[in-house]
Image (tube, helix red, strand yellow):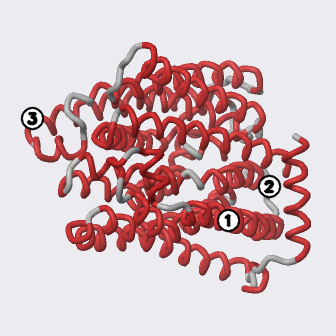
Amino acid sequence: MLKKIVGTAGTRILNALVNLAILFLITNHIGSKGLGAIGLILLDVGIIQLVIDLIAGSALIYYASRESTGKLLIPAYVWIAIVNVLFYFIFQLLKLYFPVVYSTVIPEGAELTIIGLAVINSLMLTHYNLLLGHEKIKTYNTIFTTQVLVVLLVFLIHIFYLDLKTFDAYVNSLYAGYSIAALFSFFAMLGISRSWTIRRWPATTRKVIQYGIVTQIANVLHIGNKRFSFYIIKRFAGLPPLGIYTAGVQLTEGLRLIGQSISIVQFATLSNTTDKKYAAQLTVKLMKFTVLLTFAAVLVLIILPESFYTWIFSKAFTGVKPVILILSPGVIALAANAIFSHYFSGLGNPKVNLWSNVVGFIFTVILAFSLIPLFGINGAAATASVSYLSTVIYQYIIFKKQTGTRFGEWIPQRKDFRDFRELVKETFRR
């Protein structure tokens, strides 16, 4: 498992570095307004993906080792087509009858871009989920690495060779990266699938929906906790402040790579076990690694002065340092949230994640409408941190109740540091 975590962490670190390079290019060549538009486009693609994930989401990871690939993949493809057609018509209705809402949630004329990205992204993620469900972590990491490098390469070509310095340059890069990853992951999936029978697929789809509906409601609320403020900022302040906030969010949430790297392996492992005691012990161990590493990374961002950020991202992004400071407690909470969420989902109990996100979303709605009009992007950052912390507190209470884990077990011990040292050694050996 440590080898899988190290491999995934290496992939995520590379992804974080690529995203940092892309953020540097966007802030210096496209500007805060362009970054604000990109943030909205990616948010809208993410919302479409939430609906698609009802049948093509994390439930595929859970059922990949339990059902044939055909009974999972064909309904997923059909659902992807239905959802994207539906959202296209929703966008047209918003444009005709609710122009204020349309201009708030969609950059002008970007609806076809959003739909196109959503289609390719959903195909890619569907294939990724099936690979993870079969515990093909190395294959997943290889394709994911290819994806992020293609995005960076194509973006560099647009900026420096084609001299295209609008958000379309980044959109085209995403098209290239998503397409190649969707194709490669499809062929990789062909090689590992044990069965392509589609007999009795309706029964399998019903099970996927029963598992997925709770998970997706939880994910909708989770995205709401993280991104609802984007729309409020756009409504009250416009795209340039949204661009500054997006830069702060991308820098801090980039540290989620630690929790994501560990929780991906955790989820794939727990989805293939029925030993609840082992699952709880593993979760506590991985939580210590995740929180300690994330805390150390957050300290680095806090120590760096404001002048460093304006030097990297240009003076148009003055004000990003306070956003980073206020978001920091929430980022640590997000790291813990990833481990808790994958524990409950991996054991087939996603309702806990649903209710934890309900708690967080209540805080988000109340605070967003009260703090953002008064304090702008700093109010949005405070809203996010409070929401993330409340979510994790709820998950901790339920985990403690279900497993009987004592508080002292969460405190790092000498053995934990020895294990961490071995993990670091393994990282450098690889």
Residue nearest the viewer, comparing 283 with 322 = 322
The residue labelled by disc 3 is 96
- Specify whether 37 is left or right of 337: left
Q: Amino acid at mark 1?
A: Ala
Question: Closer to the N terminus: mark 2 or mark 3?
Answer: 3
Q: Quadrant of the C terminus?
A: top right
Which mark lies nearer to you, 1 or 3? Answer: 1
Give the residue furthest to the top: 162
Residue nearest the viewer, comparing 390 with 188 = 390
Q: Is residue 326 above or below residue 306?
A: below
Dot label at residue 296 = 1
SS at badge 1: helix
The residue labelled by disc 2 is 273
SS at badge 3: helix
- Which quadrant of the structure image shows residue 193? top right
Dot label at residue 133 = none
Question: Residue 170's spot in the image, x, y percent?
Answer: 42, 28
Q: Amino acid at mark 2?
A: Thr
State yes or no: discs 2 and 3 in contact (Cβ < 8 Å).
no
Residue nearest the viewer, comparing 110 with 55 = 110
Residue nearest the viewer, comparing 130 with 179 = 179
Q: Amino acid at mark 3?
A: Leu
Q: CA distance from mark 2 to mark 3?
A: 51 Å
Task: Using the rendered image of the protein, determine whether residue 238 is visible from the camera's viewpoint.
Answer: yes
Question: Residue 163's spot in the image, x, y percent?
Answer: 38, 17
